[in-house]
Image (cartoon, grey):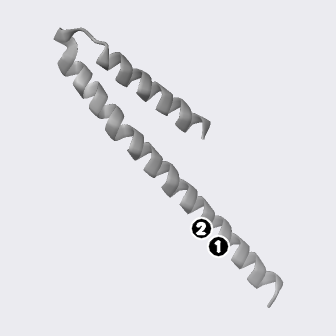
Amino acid sequence: MVRLLAATRRQLWLAVAALEAEPHARLGSAVTTWVAVVAWPARVLIFILSCTLALIRVVMRAASMARVMWP
């Protein structure tokens, strides 16, 4: 969670820096802003999927332990 928040803060900083860039750097800043807009939701989705997978593993492990303990 801390890494996700740090990455989000860095992406926001890059977006602000892109908005304050000089006019000749507009193309690069547009690309940087686009990467920030696309990368953040992708990281959130990956985080949610990995948490879901870990939860499924825990539930399956608990179910298999319960099946062994109570026949």
Residue 60: image tag: 1
Residue type of the residue flagged with mark 2: Ile
In front: 22, or 32? 22
Q: Nearer the viewer, residue 10 or 50?
A: 10
| Residue pictured at 39% horizontal, 45% vertical | 42
Q: Could you tell me which secondary element the residue under label 1 belongs to?
A: helix
Determine whether, in the image, residue 69 is placed left or right of residue 22: right
Compare residues 16 and 7 and report the one nearer the observer. Answer: 16
Q: Position of residue 46 (x, y in %)?
A: 46, 50
The CA span between labels 1 and 2 is: 6 Å
Residue placed at 44% from the left, 51% from the top? 45
Q: What label does residue 34 carry, if any?
A: none
Up the image or down, 6 lies above or below 59; here it is above
* Residue name at image x 82 percent, y 82 percent: 69
Please report contact status of discs 1 and 2: CB closer than 8 Å, yes or no.
yes
Instruction: Please identify the residue farthest to the right as the structure is shown.
Output: 69
Tell me the kind of residue under disc 1. Met
Is residue 20 positioned above or below 69 on the image?
Answer: above
**Extreme residue toward the bottom, this view:** 71
Helix, strand or loop under label 2: helix
